[in-house]
Image (cartoon, rainbow, N blue to C red):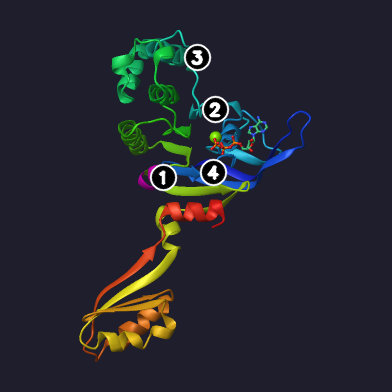
Amino acid sequence: MTAITCKDIHFSYKPAFLKRYDVLKGLSFAVAEGSIYGFLGINGAGKTTTIKLLNNFIKPDTGTVTIFGLDARDIRARSFIGYMPENPGFYAYLNAREFLTFISRLKGTDRAEIKSSVDDLLRLVGLEGHADMPVSRYSKGMGQRLGLAQALIGNPALVILDEPMANLDPIGRRAFRDIFLTLKEQGKTLFFSTHIIPDVETLCDKVGILMNGMIVKEGSLDDLIASHIEYIECILRGREAAAFAERYRSQALGVTVQADNAILRFADEKLADAIVRDLAGSTVRMVSLEAHTQSLEDIFLHVAGGR
Ligand SMILES: Nc1ncnc2c1ncn2[C@@H]1O[C@H](COP(=O)(O)OP(=O)(O)OP(=O)(O)O)[C@@H](O)[C@H]1O
Ligand SMILES: [Mg+2]
């Protein structure tokens, strides 16, 4: 089943005394159950707005949002979702254990199970040593950890996180990544927004890039990267390598000769076939043929920055 679908969502803010402002202009995407979806976009792209729509905190002007097949406006849809907001806020005078116990009660966790499930969550996010400290004394990263723990109360099938890795040190980021992968192994679906590219690269089954109110690029990391081959590099070796490579100079991006090696760079994949064919019957050997792809960061900067 599809965990999330957004179909042709339009959404605009109308601040008092100011002009209506279109944020989402035909946003469509789907998140498969059991997968991790990375929602990329620059500041102000509309990531938090989209996440508020998924949670039914705000409603689209037009278009539909479904959660496990239910309209997001249906109260039952909420029961599938664990949500970690962008800047989680807490009651400063409670400690982490009290806060998680309070939220567990609100979420309707069986009273007999609350203590052990709160202990498990504190351990999972690495806060067991700070469970009795008032939240007002927490660092930002500790707040993020508590935010994640509260999102996981009640064992939700779908976990939606708005920039979960912000404020985390490298150890915290690694811990969050491990937790996300464990959640995925348990069959949960994760949807998170970010602009931290390495987190997307190590975690996500699918990536969507939000720009100008729409998904402008979407696919698995392999699909996105493979569709962006920058150039192909072929290394030839042999006494006649230089002369052999010269034959392709007009079609190549560049030819470099070093001793018995010739390096050919070209953009057209078909040229690779021609070179392989021509090598038959020649004394030249091909020692490497490699496609150089753009990184996700290059693609993101290209899409987001128009570069
Ligand atoms: N309550 C609001 N009233 C009016 N405009 C808003 C409101 N909330 C957000 N916006 C505007 O909507 C646009 C999208 O904001 P949103 O918070 O969804 O972006 P974002 O992608 O989450 O950005 P960031 O990476 O900075 O968190 C921005 O231009 C923002 O100024
Ligand atoms: Mg945001």
Quadrant for residue 122, please give it: top left
Task: Give residue 106's mark.
Answer: 3
Tag 1 and tag 4, C-beta contact below 8 Å: no
CA separation in Å, label 3 and label 1: 32 Å
Amino acid on which disc 4 is placed: Ile
Tag 3 and tag 4, C-beta contact below 8 Å: no
Q: Earlier in the sequence, mark 2 or mark 4?
A: 4
Query: Magenta segment, principal secondary structure?
Result: helix
Q: Answer yes or no: disc 4 within 8 Å of ligand 1.
A: yes
Query: Which is more foreground, mark 3 or mark 1?
Result: 1
Q: Earlier in the sequence, mark 3 or mark 4?
A: 4
Characterize the local packing of mark 1: few (<14), some (14-19) or many (20 or more) Cα atoms within 10 angstroms: many
Q: Earlier in the sequence, mark 1 or mark 4?
A: 4
62 horizontally vs 133: left or right: right
Q: Earlier in the sequence, mark 3 or mark 1?
A: 3
CA separation in Å, label 3 and label 2: 13 Å
State which region is magenta: 198-202
Query: Which is more foreground, mark 1 or mark 4?
Result: 4
Instruction: From the image, tell me which residue sits under label 2.
Output: 78
CA separation in Å, label 2 and label 4: 27 Å
CA separation in Å, label 1 and label 4: 14 Å
CA separation in Å, label 1 and label 2: 26 Å
Amino acid on which disc 2 is placed: Arg
Q: Is residue 210 above or below residue 299?
A: above
Instruction: From the image, tell me which residue sits under label 1.
Output: 200
| Of residues 149 and 213, the one drawn nearer to the viewer in this rendering | 213
Secondary structure of the residue carrying tag 4 is loop
Secondary structure of the residue carrying tag 1 is helix
Q: Is residue 91 above or below residue 218?
A: above
